[in-house]
């Protein structure tokens, strides 16, 4: 990625922001996609607005791909990562625990001989 700060940083010709479609004013981001001839450019305002979500998504995707490359995972192509809220996981764990307690209470208990 490249941060374009001035006209001397060689901004692409006739490019617009890939997010909002607006004009590119300094500073803006312009990423040359490995010599593909098409640059990904994002204006400064969009960079500021989407930075947290964009970085979180990019990190998640990179983590999924890194995890899939681990040789010890036999089903590595079907493995993925999903971002969940901690509160959702807690609620699921509590429900699972309550279900296990309920299921255990329906199992007939054996009374040891001689205790009747
Ligand atoms: Zn924009």
Image: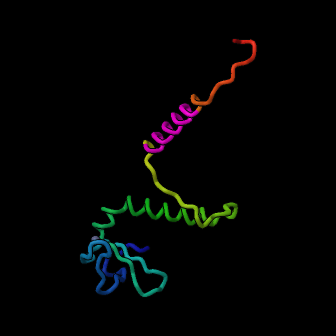
**Can you give x and y, in whole percent of width and height, for residue 20 in the image?**
27, 72
Report the number of numbered marks.
Answer: 0
Quarter of the picture holding the C terminus? top right
Quarter of the rendering containing residue 114:
top right
Q: Position of residue 13 (x, y in %)?
A: 31, 87
Which residue occupies 55% across, 31% down?
Answer: 101
Quadrant containing the N terminus is: bottom left
In the image, farthest residue toward the right = 113
Q: Residue drawn at (40%, 84%), measured in percent from left and top?
A: 38
Using the image, determine if residue 62 lies above or below residue 7: above
Q: Who's the residue at 51% across and 33% down the image?
A: 98
> x, y (%) of residue 7?
31, 81
Q: Which span is picked out in magenta?
A: 88-103
In the rendered image, residue 1 lying in the magenta stretch gets the answer no
Q: Quadrant of ligand 1?
A: bottom left
Furthest-left residue in this view: 22
State left or right for residue 105 relative to residue 49.
right
23 or 107, which is in the foreground?
107
As drawn, is 10 to the left or to the right of 111? left
Q: Specify the quadrant of the image occupied by residue 87.
A: top left
Residue 77 drawn above or below residue 109? below
Relative depth, front residue between 104 and 82: 104
């Amino acid at each position: 990625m490249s941060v374009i700060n001035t006209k001397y940083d060689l901004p692409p010709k006739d490019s617009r922001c890939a997010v909002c479609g607006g004009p590119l004013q300094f500073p803006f981001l312009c990423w040359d996609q490995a010599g593909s001839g098409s640059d990904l450019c994002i204006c400064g305002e969009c960079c500021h607005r989407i930075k947290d979500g964009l970085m979180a998504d990019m990190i998640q995707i990179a983590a999924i791909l890194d995890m899939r490359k681990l040789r010890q995972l036999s089903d590595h192509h079907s493995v993925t990562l999903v971002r969940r809220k901690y509160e959702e996981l807690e609620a699921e764990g509590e429900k699972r625990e309550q279900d296990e307690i309920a299921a255990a209470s329906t199992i007939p208990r054996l009374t040891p001989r001689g205790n009747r």
